[in-house]
Amino acid sequence: MFQEALACGLEWLRPRIGFGLDDEVKARLVRYAEEMVAANQEFNLTAITEPEAVAWKHFIDSLLGVGVIGRPGGAGEWLADLGAGAGFPGVVLAIATRWNCLEVESIRKKAAFLRRLGPLVEPAALDVWEGRAERLGRESKWRERLPVVVARALARLDVVAEYGMPLLRAGGMLVAYKGPEGRDEVALLQGIKEELGIGEIRVIEEQLPEGWGVRLLIVVEKSKDCHPRYPRREGVPEKRPLGGAGIH
């Protein structure tokens, strides 16, 4: 059932990302799903386990980002996946496009599972940052060096922006995967554009077929360096979000 749903989803996806996936990539996605389901009881990776739902709500959903990020410009290009969990969307994007992938995950068990996935993305590289995104944003190796940061089902958009924008170089993009509520969250960025170096913001909406729901990809471009105070110390972005207490 998973493979049939995946094949159906990839046909639907082809015109949206501009190319089809070859048989080797499809086989790796199937292996990934098998490894995740087998490890799920031990690592508590996902509440979605029904095969057709796994195909659409994890894999096809993740692959929507390919139409935004494309393929890397060179072998040394990295994307970061914040709050990676079971590896969605980062590992899926790496398998499909050969971006090197930095998985950012603070929960030890989930980080351990992610380390198992390295062979699936070869010849691209997979690295795991076991810790908070706030701490990663202070690391000179990564701060304002990445062309792409992705985040799926992580936090409110202003919180995601505080995690992600300090990692991006000028001209890079943050791609936040959201449900329909994401449109309202865009307003949370208006007052913090200057300090986080936010440029153009685009909202891409897709209606997944067969009743699988609406997905928004909110693409936030980086126009200049962040103020050095960001990100704030661990836990503060969620406790005191930059966009304020509510969505207006």
Image: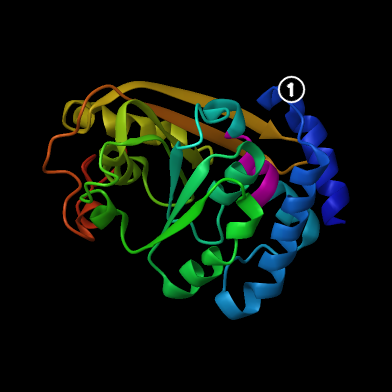
Vertical arrangement, residue 181 with respect to residue 170, above or below: below
Q: Residue at x 19, y 33 (%)?
A: 226
Q: Residue at x 64, y 73 (%)?
A: 40
Q: Position of residue 5 (x, y in %)?
A: 83, 47
Q: Position of residue 37 (x, y in %)?
A: 70, 68
Image side of residue 25 versus residue 191, left or right: right
Q: Write down the region rendered in magenta.
A: 58-65
How crowded is the residue under tag 1: few (<14 C-alpha within 10 Å), some, or many (20+)? Answer: few
Q: Nearer the viewer, residue 84 or 245?
A: 84
Q: Position of residue 71 (x, y in %)?
A: 57, 29
Q: Position of residue 152 (x, y in %)?
A: 49, 47
Residue 61 part of the magenta-drawn span: yes
Residue 10 quadrant: top right
Which residue does the numbered mark 1 point to in the structure image?
Answer: 15
Residue 222 part of the magenta-drawn span: no
Image side of residue 119 versus residue 22, left or right: left
User: Callout 1, which amino acid?
Assistant: Pro
Q: Nearer the viewer, residue 18 or 123?
A: 123
Secondary structure at numbered mark 1 = helix
Magenta segment, prevailing SS (helix, strand or loop): helix
Q: Residue at x 28, y 31 (%)?
A: 189
